[in-house]
Image (tube, rainbow, N blue to C red):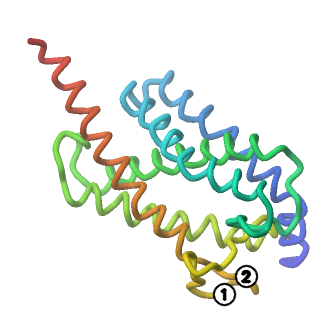
Amino acid sequence: MLNAGLELFRSHFYWIDFAIGVAAPLVAYALYRGGRIDRFMWGLFWLGFAIGLTWEVPMQVLNQMGDAWAVHRYVRPPPVHFSVIIVLHSCWDGGLFLLGVGLMRLIGRAPVFERFRAIELAVLIVWGQASELWVEMTSVSGEGWSYIPRPWNPALFKFNGQAITLMPQLIWLAAPMVFYFIALKLRGGRASERKGP
C-alpha cells in the first residue's frame, strides 16, 4: 500500500508541484480579499515571489546552458517549459515566505515587522532552513530533481541515493534575512504614511 502511494506520488509529482505553485497566489489573494491578511501581508507574498526569482531564474538558465553549468538535474524531464517552472517555483517561494510570517505571528508578539526583533528573524531563518530541506527531500522522493554536488555546492548527506547539498540551504539562510529587513523597511514606510507629515 505504501509503495503504491509512493509510486502514485512519483508519477504525479510535477503536477502536484505545479498545483501548489498555482494555488499559492490564489490562496494569498483569497486571504487578502477575505480580510484574513491585510494589504501589507499581500505585498509580502509578492516580495517573497520577487526574492525567489533571484535564484529561480539563474538556476533554470544555467541548466539550459548544459551539464557543465547545471545546478540541478531532473530525474524525469518536467512536462513544461523552464520559464513556467521559474514562475511557479517563485510562487512557491512567496507562499513559503508568507507561511514563515504566519509562524512569526504565532510565536512572536503581534504586530510583526514594527521594529527589529531577533525572535522574528530567528523564526524566519529556522522556517527557511526546515522548508528548504523538506522541499529538497520531497523532490528527491518524488523523483523530480536533485542538486548536483560541486566544489561550490558540496553534499551534506545522502537521501534516497541522492545528495542533499549546501547551496540551497545557504540560499534559504540569506533569503529570510533579506526578506525580513526589506519588510521592516516597508512597514516603517507604511507607518510613516499613516502618521502623515
Horizontal side, residue 30 vs residue 84: left or right = left
Question: Residue at 83% across / 72% down in the picture?
Answer: 6
Question: Residue at 77% across / 57% down in the picture?
Answer: 65
Horizontal side, residue 151 vs residue 74: left or right = left
* Quadrant of the rendering where the C terminus is positioned: top left
Q: Which mark is residue 107?
A: none
Query: How many numbered marks are there?
Result: 2
Labelled pair 2, 1 in contact (Cβ < 8 Å): yes
Q: Position of residue 9 (x, y in %)?
A: 83, 64
Q: Which mark is residue 158?
A: 1
* Quadrant of the rendering where the N terminus is positioned: bottom right
Horizontal side, residue 138 vs residue 176: left or right = right
Amino acid type for the residue under numbered disc 2: Gln
Whether residue 168 is situated above or below residue 151 in the rendered picture: above
Whether residue 173 is situated above or below residue 45 in the rendered picture: below
Of residue 152 and residue 12, the one placed in the foreground of this image is: 152
Q: Secondary structure at mark 1?
A: strand
Q: Position of residue 68 (x, y in %)?
A: 75, 69
Can you name the residue that lies furthest to the top here?
197
Amino acid type for the residue under numbered disc 1: Lys
Query: Callout 2: 10 Å neighbours few (<14), some, many (20+)?
Result: some
Query: Callout 1: 10 Å neighbours few (<14), some, many (20+)?
Result: few
Can you name the residue that lies furthest to the left here?
197
Of residue 147 and residue 123, the one placed in the foreground of this image is: 147
Question: Residue at 37% across / 62% down in the picture?
Answer: 125
Gap between marks 2 and 1, in whole Å?
5 Å
Q: Which mark is residue 162?
A: 2
Q: To which quarter of the image does residue 41 belong?
A: top left
Whether residue 34 is situated above or below residue 79 in the rendered picture: above
Q: Secondary structure at mark 2?
A: strand
Question: Residue at 25% across / 54% down in the picture?
Answer: 108
